[in-house]
Amino acid sequence: MRWVDAEMKKTQHAADQPGDENTVSERLDAALDRRGFTTRPLRVRAAVAVVAVTAVVAGAGVFLADNLTNAFGPDSVCDGTVSADLLNDVLGPGKVSDQAFGDGHLRSGSAFCMAKVSSGVFGNERSVTVELRKNSDLSVVANDSEARLFAASANGGASGAAFDHRAWALLPEACGSGQRVTVRADRGERPGAEKLAALAASTADRIASQQGCGTSPTPAPHQLSDAGKDRDLDRSTVCGLPGLTMPTTPGGPAFRETVTTATDPLWACLIHSDANPRSSITFTVGTEPRLLTATTPKDEPGIGRARWVKPDEMTTTCQGRPTYFRMEVNGFWDLVPDSDSAWKQFLTAGAKAIGCEPIL
């Protein structure tokens, strides 16, 4: 019906000219006559056809909006804990949905949820897996040496770590310690550290609100540290800590170390070798009290002010805040021939690096 639209434009233009006495309807009648619509039934059929075409176009628009955007979708998914807008920001435009796994709820830590975005008639589905974890030791973050960290002091209370494919954020202080939200992009997606950090922090806030311990929204993290870079191991200043050393091993494999570029909410260093990818040595310091559940020190002698809480982990206070040190050796024993000496060096050098008063 393009000709109808064209004729209407012509008649409207003619009607707008000075001195033209014909009305728009008269000119449209004339146009219909020229096209052969000379009777009322034919003219009705023409009008019906125009309306039908218009309805088809409008319906196509609704169909595309429903399949390519979240215009008709929910504002949140995963029991209200994941923002649909932030999910679209992470995974791109599309219709938002979810799939829950487990018998409980995400907010209680007894289930996890897959938050999904699909676009187009063939789906094109992308997803992130969201989970609430409760941590009792630093082993869960020992390999986060490449992470980009965000500290509460610089991010309005948001605290956690992020990579291009995953991130975690701690729940607010009022919720107690040991709770963190993790988000992981599925199917090889790499949305970026900033976007995943924002999604993790927002989800942690929403879960805190549902738990009744979130008092005010925490802003999205805006100040992330640089990612830790892989480099050759310096045995005279291991992990960049003056005073932490390792003996030379003539003829042994080449070792590398990866260290976080910040110390809040944690500091982590991974020592590894391509010659033996299953072996590693990790040094980790948890500087954010919210990172771990409170652990009672063992009733046995420690090292200086530090007390054992697990075979590979010690706790102390730094500027009045609970702080945890972990050294885990999985192979490469020739680099740590004397565990007691290595612990003393680590506690001394690590404390100085994070601004802690002397432990020994």
Image (cartoon, helix red, strand yellow):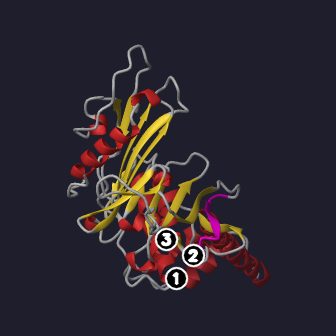
| Residue 1 in view here | no
Q: Is residue 146 above or below residue 157?
A: above
C-alpha distance separating marks 1 and 3: 12 Å
Dot in front, 3 or 2: 2
Locate residue 342, reporting x and y percent: 35, 39
Q: Which mark is residue 265?
A: none
Tell me what residue is drawn at x 25 percent, y 55 percent. Answer: 359
Locate residue 86, reporting x and y percent: 47, 67
Dot in front, 1 or 3: 1
Q: Assess whether mark 1 and mark 2 are in contact (beta carbons under 8 angstroms).
A: yes
Judged from the image, the secondary structure of the residue bearing numbered disc 1 is helix
In the displayed orientation, state which residue is furthest to the right. 41
| Residue occupied by mark 3 | 203
Specify whether residue 111 is painted magenta: yes
C-alpha distance separating marks 3 and 2: 10 Å
Q: Quadrant of residue 234?
A: top left
